[in-house]
Image: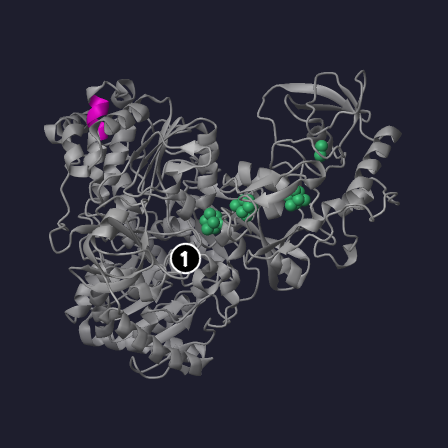
Amino acid sequence: MNTIKQLDLGTEESKSKEMVSIEIDGQLLEVKNGTSIMRAARESGIDVPKLCATDTLKSFGSCRLCVVEIEGRKGFPASCTTLAEEGMKIRTQTNKVANLRRNVMELYISDHPLDCLTCSANGDCELQDMAGAVGLRDVRYGFEGKNHLEAVVDESNPYFNFDASKCIVCSRCVRACDEIQGTMALTIEGRSFDSKVSASIGESFLDSECVSCGACVQACPTATLMEKSIIDHGQPEHSIDTTCAYCGVGCSFKAEMKGDQVVRMIPNKDGKANNGHSCVKGRFAWGYSTHKERVLDPLIRESVGDSWKKVSWEEAINYAAKRFKEIQNKYGRKSIGGITSSRCTAEEVYAVQKMVRTAFSNNNVDTCARVCHSPTGYGLKTTLGTSAGTQPFESVMDADAIIVIGANPTDGHPVFASQMKKRLRQGAKLIVIDPRKIDLVETPHIKAEHHLALQPGTNVAIINALAYTIIKEDLIDEEYVNERCDMESFEAWKNCILKSENNPDNVEKISGVNAETIRSAARLYGSAKRSAIYYGLGVTEHSQGSTMVMGIANLAMATGNIGFSGCGVNPLRGQNNVQGSCDMGSFPHELPGYQPIGDDSIRKIFEDNWQVSIDSEPGFRIPNMFDAAISGEFMGMYIQGEDLAQSDPNTQHVEAALGNMECIVVQDLFLNETAKFAHVFLPGTSFLEKDGTFINAERRINRVRPVMKSRQGMHEWLITQNLANAMGYAMNFGSEAEIMDEIAQLTPTFRNVSHNFLDRFGSVQWPCNEDAPTGTPIMHIDNFVRGKGLFVETDYVATEERTNRKFPLLLTTGRILSQYNVGAQTRRTQNIVWHDKDLLEIHPHDAETRGIKNKDQVSLASRKGEVTLTAKITERVQPGVVYTTFHNPETGANVVTTEHSDWATNCPEYKVTAVQITPANHKSKWQDQFKARAKQEGKIIEALH
Ligand code: SF4
Ligand code: SF4
Ligand code: SF4
Ligand code: FES
């Protein structure tokens, strides 16, 4: 628990290493050259009044409240815009400056509603504070003249209001939107008295370009921009530091509380991943944790179709254990398994994989990373030696050229996108490789140098063509490669790449990308001083996902772009703890820390600690579990926080597998689609109740702290532990901290990590051990973790999923900003205002030839199935490509996706499905069945609540 207000030093920190000596109010000070007088004063405890300045924004100098006197200078300079100079003598508290400040405040207050006592910002208003600070006792100007007091409040945004009557036109909101968020949604319209803040030329906030990140609300010094939660519940009393549970950026927040109720989430300025910024999900979309549909009682039922019965924790856990044991007795030891969740903490995940390996006596454990970033783990481990990205997010601020491949950061990783956009506005060059025109291709003040709008499924052809050009045009960093890489593999790779099929002229025919564009992009990446690659699921979710990851690593090594700031290979992880769930031994072939299960000496260390013998054979991956379920060999599954029925490909196959199992235990917040097939439901905890760690895309281990008691009465790790005990294995952790202690003991890359350590020093990036006691922001600095960097040959092999006359279009999928994956959380918040259903994007040409108009219902059919969606005609997709999101269960996007998967990891090929689109006036058969099942489940759920 800590105080609410975050320190504000008024202006940004200077990056200079030089120091200057100054005197402020008689105090001799040494400050960094380039520091403002305001910051210098505040750093030494002298609070110069301010309104338009804040240390997250550039100085602006508009309010004139911060004036000071400087010996030998005329007038009263603003301390926020005047830099400290050697020998300066400054006085901040003279009578003259006091009078000036009072006059400024008097003018502000004369056009401000004097409703402080009933104002929602009472107690947290800088205008109110400054009136006190300058000693304002009296306002000489009346309210009878022109004023803004009648301005209408804009309540359109679901999370915050804009009350123009309270605006002092300090422009902090406009600057926050420009400088921090990079959306440029706000302007100051008009001049002098008529000047006012306006969202996208007079539109309401909801209809404007605003993406509801809340940076302007946080920057506003008055109640003009104010969270509705504060208007409804009042000011918070204390705050607790924790971490966002949505995406892999891992933003740190202060959960501001009133008693045990969250009233606001404020991004933490000290958060190393987000530096005080956030997106709409983390800042505002946390209401799902108290949503009425959340299930808080353990439930059991004999068979699917029976009504759920509320039972005690003990009864539910014993029931699950009994059924699992019966299955093992009947079908054998390997007939059950477990799935870990990337939404849960590292400690909770660790407990599940330990339960599977001890109480279940097999290695049938897998994780949702199987369907997203498993190729990242495979590809980066093979080439570089570590299954993780190489850089901290801040590294992007040193990049000169940036490639974004198969990722849409402004929607999927918004806070990182804002940082990247800042760097792009400073002049770094951007190459986007994506079938779709994502926002980054062209957005205010940013235009990508090149957009390689490739055909879905041709990533590897493109990366090879880029490499071909780099080799042909002598852009290889020979010295780096000679010194740091395995030369035999380099030569083999070079020979492979120089095959004529990788010539850009040839790749143009495969990918649809102009050969000259490929060459220019290669030159840009290969010749920039520091080049970075960021990629997402548009790289991994392909039949050649692992090949593409290795192709990216090859390119980065060949151009000497790994091992320092501004470069690297950077997977943008989807879920909050994807990195952590992989780190914790969730794969069937690896113990925690990616230690091979087949290695006797490693297994022995775990066996000695766990006091059990561990199977040396890798267990089933998720797709193998489904196949084995259909063939009657795999009959029981424990599913921690993952909705397999909605998120995995080829829904009919998944449903057939789930329907064939004899015991499915679902541990989740809500009765999700998978729970429709479950026999035991164990209610989970939301991130607001969890204690532990999430590990983000930078390998950063962030603390998650409980801000309220577990609403269902039991921590998730304890549920798992109790089930393990009921199955006959004595697991006896006393707390989450003890679990982390065991992780540290058994995992070399976590050796120095403990909750105590993280609480004292803040987040760290693993490896954090004897060699790197405070963590490792940049990997592979002098050597690759595997020794010499390994080049891997990456021949392009076209996917088996082909278009033909029956299925002439290619479907690819993605996410949007306001929703999160299968939408279980965000659909239960006001974020539905922005996205209440998934749409199918189709190019005008393809729509016209099919007689499809905007908003028409269309049938989306593939070789696997058919669903009906609403069409959105847009040139964001190229002809021949259609696109949809998968946030709503009734969309059934995975009804049409296929069983094709990555050759190395089985990561499904979500990004390429051959489809046909036709006008439709009815829902598909699957959607009718879905509706009927939902109705039946609805009745069951209604009876429960
Ligand atoms: S909420 Fe964010 S995007 Fe919207 S106006 Fe404010 S700063 Fe800009
Ligand atoms: S809305 Fe707030 S931040 Fe923006 S100009 Fe008005 S007072 Fe300043
Ligand atoms: S960027 Fe990701 S981690 Fe940060 S607030 Fe948004 S969803 Fe949360
Ligand atoms: S705070 Fe310096 S001019 Fe406003």
Does any portion of residue 599 appear in the rendered image? Answer: no
Q: Where in the figure is residue 120, as x and y percent of width and height?
A: 70, 57
Question: Closest to the observer: 613 or 212?
Answer: 212
Q: What residue type is labelled 1?
A: Arg
Magenta-span inclusion, residue 691: no
Name the quarter where the N terminus is drawn. bottom right
Residue 469 covered by magenta stretch = yes
Specify whether 435 is left or right of 417.
left
213 to the left or right of 861: right
Work out whether residue 812 or residue 484 is closer to the camera in this orientation and state it: 812
The color scheme shown is: one colour
Sort mark 1 into few (<14), some (14-19) or many (20+) by Cα contacts within 10 Å: many
Main secondary-structure element of the magenta-colored stretch: helix
Circle 1 — which element?
Answer: loop
Q: Where is residue 610? Give x, y as percent.
A: 35, 59
- In the figure, 931 relative to 585: above or below? below
Position in image of residue 825 (x %, y %): 44, 62
Name the residue located 32 percent from the left edge and 84 percent from the top edge: 306
Q: Which of 841 and 587 is in front in this view?
A: 841
Count of labels shown? 1
Q: Which quadrant of the figure has residue 320? A: bottom left
Examine the rendering and report whether any part of residue 866 can be seen.
Answer: yes
Quadrant position of residue 508: top left
- Give the residue drawn at x 46%, y 55%: 245
User: Residue 627: image x %, image y %?
Assistant: 17, 64
- Cβ of disc 1 within 8 Å of ligand 3? no
| 303 sits left or right of 904 in the view | right
The segment highlighted magenta reads 466-471
Provide the residue designation for mark 1.
343
Does residue 13 lie above or below 748 as drawn? above
